[in-house]
Image (tube, helix red, strand yellow):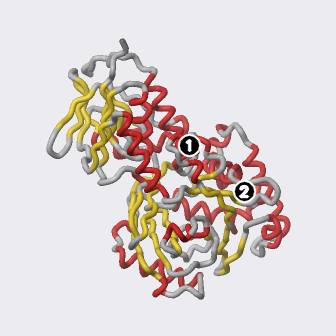
Amino acid sequence: MKHSVNWGIVGGGFLGMTIAHRLAKAGQRVALFEGAATLGGLASAWSLGDVVWDRHYHVTALSDTTLRALLRELGLEDSMRWVNTRTGFYVDGQLYSLSNAMEFLRFPPLNPIEKLRLGATILAASRIKDWKPLESVTAIDWLTRWSGRSTVDKIWRPLLRAKLGDMYDQASAAFIWAIIARMYAARRTGMKKEMFGYVPGGYARVLERYAQVLENDGVRVVLGRPASKVEASGAGVSVQFADSRELFDRVVVTTAAPLCPRIVSGLRSDEIERLNGVRYQGILCASLLLRKPLAGYYVTNITDASVPFTAVIEMSALVDPEFLGGHTLVYLPKYVAPDAAEFALSDDEIRERFVRALEAMYPAFRRDDILSFRISRVRYVFAVSTLGYSQRVPPIATSLPGVFLVNSSQILNGTLNVNETLQLAHRAADEFLALPERVPDLVAS
């Protein structure tokens, strides 16, 4: 008879939930601990007045097959709504539509040669299958080679700087390839229109259903209980909480790489160095509920350095306003380093900066259009794939018997989305289910 291993999982985002789901389905005993009051992590939901929607912006692409498989398992894929969206570009104080081939040909900021080279860059990236050679060249150098210096200066460099801050010139070409490849795969043939989907009710509905599935699996889900210490010993692996301690055969920690050494005791110095060496970007993300739309673009990319946010995500250009109380939902993300001074700004200071920028961008926008305004702050969102990054990715297994680390640093090249998170969870679960039943004894160093 197969032995049932007792697993503890720290972190209740989609990563921890999916690992728990896979292990429990295989007959393992699983406890899932989440420090927040709700499941979901970066994909959790919150309220804006009477409207409940995602705390950060999320979208499902047609090519997100792993996420769609989960939604199918949860009985939600058939309810998805698929929408052709439009894209805007804000350049030198002007807002342009860049939603189809004709608009691309008319795009004033670029001359015909620059447009030709930009199109060739995107096409070339979409056809690359082996990304590893791209790790040896920076994104800026690769884009300059394909798009030319003027197009890089006008488009690519501002976009990379907005996403990566001072690290924009350290990212490898594999980073920009991953973004282009996903977005290109989301487009249909013909005019290459963007086709994105969502579940009515947003991730609040998805997470509610996933929680029910975990309960049916027999997973013990504990919310509002952050782990303070994970420690391996001859008796097993203990997880320490503020008021108690639990013992497991194996423990999986899903927090961001630089946070792992703060709670996992006994890691070797080289393991700590590798985890701390992962460079992350954080985010300040404002959610605004408005009385009326801004411009109707799902995404407005911004190359103007004077704008204090990275992009404008008009979610109601994708999501039917019937799910948003008839209002407009807008996200204003600002990607920053984990130690950025912006994290110390008050909500009122951020609101004033962001609202002033909206007034400059959209002449018809008025402050009294704002029905609700909330700020989400997360210091560790995605790892930046720098040169040779795949050779420095922290491994899942640690030197501590029974202790495993699974986190976003192990997603190569991408900027983190639910589909990639689920793929990582399945890879980790496959590795865990292939382990021998007996946990090795802890060997003193």
Foreground disc of the pair 1, 2: 1
SS label for mark 2: helix
Q: Earlier in the sequence, mark 1 or mark 2?
A: 1
Q: Can residue 28 be seen in this snapshot?
A: yes
Mark 1: give few (<14), some (14-19) or many (20+) Cα within 10 Å.
few
* Position above or below: 56 against 442: below
Identify the disc placed on residue 185: none
**Looking at the image, how many numbered discs can be counted on the residues?**
2
Q: Residue at x 40, y 28 (%)?
A: 397
Q: Position of residue 323 (x, y in %)?
A: 51, 67
Name the residue type under label 1.
Answer: Arg
Q: Describe residue 173's horizontal placement relative to residue 386 as left or right.
A: right
Q: Position of residue 140 (x, y in %)?
A: 65, 55
Q: Position of residue 102 (x, y in %)?
A: 82, 68
Residue occupied by mark 1: 72
- Viewer-side residue, 226 vs 216: 216
Q: Residue at x 42, y 20 (%)?
A: 435
Determine the image quadrant of residue 268: top left
* Position above or below: 181 against 248: below
Q: Describe residue 424's horizontal placement relative to residue 6 as left or right.
A: right
- Viewer-side residue, 291 vs 440: 291
Q: Describe residue 194's horizontal placement relative to residue 49 as left or right.
A: right
Q: Residue at x 22, y 21 (%)?
A: 234
Name the residue type under label 2.
Answer: Thr
SS label for mark 1: helix
* Position above or below: 258 against 43: above
Q: Position of residue 420 (x, y in %)?
A: 54, 44
Mark 2: give few (<14), some (14-19) or many (20+) Cα within 10 Å.
some
Identify the disc placed on residue 144: 2
- Viewer-side residue, 201 vs 59: 201
